[in-house]
Every structure is written in structure tokens, then in C-alpha cells.
Image (spheres, rainbow, N blue to C red):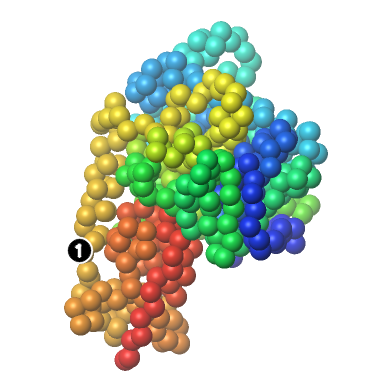
Amino acid sequence: MNSYWIESTKNLEIQRKLDNNYNVDVCIIGAGMVGLSTGYYLAKKGLKMAILDKDGIGKKASGHTTAKITYQHGLKYNYLINTFGLEFAYKYYKSNKNAIEDIKKIIDEEKIDCDFEYQNNYIYCTEPKEVIKIKNEINALNQIVKYENKQNDKNNPQFITNCGLPFKILGGIETKKQAEFHPRKYMLGLAKSIEENNGLIFTNSLVNDVKKFENGYISYCGNYNIKSKYVVIASHYPFINFPGFYFSKMYQVTSYALGIDIGNKLFDGMYISSNEPTLSFRSAKYKDKRLLILGGGNHKTGFSPESENTYGYKFLEVKAKELFPNSQILYKWNTRDCISLDKVPYIGEFSEFMPNVFVATGFNKWGMTSSNVAANIISDSILGEENDYKDIYNSKRMEPIKNKTEVKNMIEQVTKSFITSRIKIPKENIDKIKKGNGGIIKIEGKAVGIYKDEEENIYAVNPTCTHLGCLLTWNNIDKTWDCPCHGSRFDYKGKNLYDPAFKDLQNIEVRC
């Protein structure tokens, strides 16, 4: 099963592989929400650009989302105030609030039919210990609203004890006039506008290197290249390791989603739990009815919890049958999200050593509004215009994180992954690997990744990530090799699926 967003728009593909060399003002690497939103703003200003993607329009993270357009990114603002101060938290709030309005403005101006709907957003809890966190978050939001001088706004966040879900909650936050949409219809609409404004979009075109050239850069893509003054790395996870060092500042989390026909009228609104394991609810237009989008079950990429009941598709399937016994699962998908160590995205200049190269990453599972924030900051920088919010997203920041308690576990997990994954080699053999499963064995002292299909055909690869050399782990849910260090993924044949790696794994011949 595939993403509902992609399956429902598969007949609207843009297929155009790079087949020549080009000189442009801006080369954008990545045709997801960030790349297309940035390209849209710059194309409307008359800049000549090329957007390249190794797959297609919104085929990766942007097309595997739950697609909520909200500034309430979980329990965020109490953390931001305590860590960075009230003004910082206000700017984060305001930039994402503006993003909702900007997305709606683009939809209206370009007449993009993407099922946009305003909805109330809810963060709810079902455990007593979570209630105080909910109340602290509302207090934080009230401080921000007061800072903005909107104390009597009817849309101010409210504490609630009933939100319309088919189970009891102990408390929650209601935030009004948030939104949802069909993300791939929106991205295809952006692409159409970009091309109408003389922008170039190339799919199935993998950029594997960017190098300085005179007063600009050359982006290399197979036998061809793009010369440009500016480069925007909008590839989800930056594939250039140095000098940005983004691999040391974030990790990836895998989240899952189901598209479910529950057979009844669905509730309105968008919902997410405050406690783990996360559960997310929203609905989407589907033929003549509504489709429930149930998300959650997340875990750090490369590490799966011991019990399948607490993560992945099985966790969501059990919840779906528990809440909606007669429901039918029509779609399944998952994605990887980049998590920054301080919970704030990296948006802006890639590095002091690469002027005019920009990056946007680390959206912490909230890419819909964050992508528009990034597009505004980056396009303003290229156009030489001021932006009120770029300072809080400073992508070059390397200073110590202020709230050490908040991120201690994150740092320890990243460090442990990077070190132990290089040296830990499970001692197994081919006979012990069950049909439809995979694992790492030793052959003549070397680690070999083995997958055995249902017909007992053997597929062997070098299980070393082509990004920075971490030992991969087998993911039996998706039949993939996952990197526990930085989140790259490869299929069982070794083909690269997800960044930051872009090279395939080496295949190994194994004789049984």
C-alpha cells in the first residue's frame, strides 16, 4: 500500500529528466514542500531557476505526511519560553501562524484545488500526569497572546475536556482556525505556477555534488550540471556533510500512517496526543466520503521498540480496530522526519564557507507550516529583503543547547548510535534467518547483510551505510536496511531510498 496523497494523484505526474546543461539564477535541490514553495516565491519575482529531485514532485517526506497546517506543533511553546525566552517563542508562533495565511493566499491566488479546509486543532491527553503539561502549555500560549496584545481574541487557545473523539480525554488544548489540505495537489499546483513563470523542474534527476565555480556553484547531476549563483538544499536531510555538519545536529524518526474507511460520518478537527506513543487523527476528502488519517507509532529510525504493540503499523491497526471495529484499511505509509537537538528547524545559510548556499531541515515532524516559513526566509535572503524571523532559525548555530535536561536523551542516543553501530555485528547465519526476514551475519570475518524472501532467494549486501559508514539494521516492517545514525534507508537489494546517503549499497555474491 502507498500514501493516499500519492496514489490519488499518480495520474498527475510531472516527468522530465535533466537532459542538458543550464545556467540559472537559483538551483533548488528537492521538489518537496520547501523546494517548491521557495521556487514559487522566486519565480513570481522573475528569477530564473531549476528545481531537481531524484524522484518526483512530493514523492518523499512531503507526500507521506498527515498534512496538518498548524502552528501548534505539539507541546512546544512552554519549552520555547523556558529555553529561549518569550520573544523567541513569540517569533516562532508568529512565523508559523503567518505560514497558514500564506499557504491560503497562494491557494486562492493560483486557484489550486487541494481540499484546503479550516479546522480546529486539538492536543489531548488521556493520562493524569499529562494534564499539568497541557495546562503549562496553555499558560505559555497565553503569555504569547498577551505579548501580541490579543487578549480578547475569540480564537485564543482554550483548555477543554471534551473534543469529539470516540474516547474519553482528561484534558486538551483547542486551537481554532488551523487547517488541513491535500499536500500533493498543493505541490503540483505550485509546480504548475513555477513552470508558467519560466521555472524549470526536473524529476528523476539525482544531484550528487555541489562545488564552487567562479562566482557561483555547479550542481552535478549525472552527465549534466546546473550553474547558478544560488543553491537551495531542500532535500529533506542535507546530503553535503561538510562544512555544514548537520549530521551532528539532528537525527531521524520514523512515523506511520493509515488511510481508513470507517464507514460512518467522521468527526471534524485535527488531533494529536501529548503522550507517547503518539496518536494523530484527521480526515480527508475521499470520493463521496471522508477518509480517516490515523498516524503515530513513531520510533527513532534504525531502532524499533521491543514490542510491536507500541510502534509501527501494528500499533495503529490495533487502535483502528479498537476504536472503529468495522473499519477497512485502504492505505499505509510511513516517513522519516529530521529532529533537531533543540527542537527548532535549521533555516538559512548552509555554512560560512559556502556563501549563497541555503538549507532548510530539522522540521521536527511539522513540515507543512515550517516549509513555508523556510521558503519565506530563504527567498527573502536571495532577494536581499528583510525577514523578521530568520534569526531564530539560524541554521549555522552551534552554540551549547540551553535546556540540557530536555535534550540529554537525544544527544546520548545519537552518540551511542554513531559509535556502537560501527562495531556491533550480530552473530547469526543464513539458516537462522527466517523466510521473509533479514539480518547480519559474518562471512570470513566480514559483516554481510542478508535478506531471505518467501521463496528462500538470498539477497546479500554490504550493510555499511554509504553516508558515513554506520552499520545498518534490518527493518522487517518495510523490508529495508535502516541507518541508526542518520536515518538513511535502502531496500533489500541495496537501492538507496532515503537521504542523507544517495549511493546504493554494494551487492555481495553469497553461495549457499
Residue 249 appears in the picture as rendered: yes
| Residue drawn at (32%, 33%) of the image | 398
| Residue 79 on image: x %, y % | 38, 26
Does 338 appear above or below 94?
below
Which residue is rendered at x = 37% and y = 21% of the image? 84
Who's the residue at 69% across and 50% down the image? Answer: 200
Q: Residue at x 40, y 70 (%)?
A: 505
Q: Quadrant of residue 454?
A: bottom left
Question: Is residue 398 toward the left or the right of residue 201 in the image?
Answer: left
Asked if residue 322 shows in the view, the reply is no
Position of 307 with respect to 328 (left or right) is left
Vertical relation: 187 (above or below) 314: above
* Count of marks, rendered view: 1
Above/below status of 275 relative to 84: below
Nearer to us in this view, 27 or 481: 27
Name the foreground residue: 500 vs 320. Answer: 500
Question: Outermost residue, bottom direction?
Answer: 512
Q: Is residue 215 left or right of residue 88?
A: right
Mark 1 residue type: Ile
In percent of width and height, residue 453 lies at 44, 81
Q: Which residue is tagged 1?
A: 423
Viewport quadrant of the C terminus: bottom left
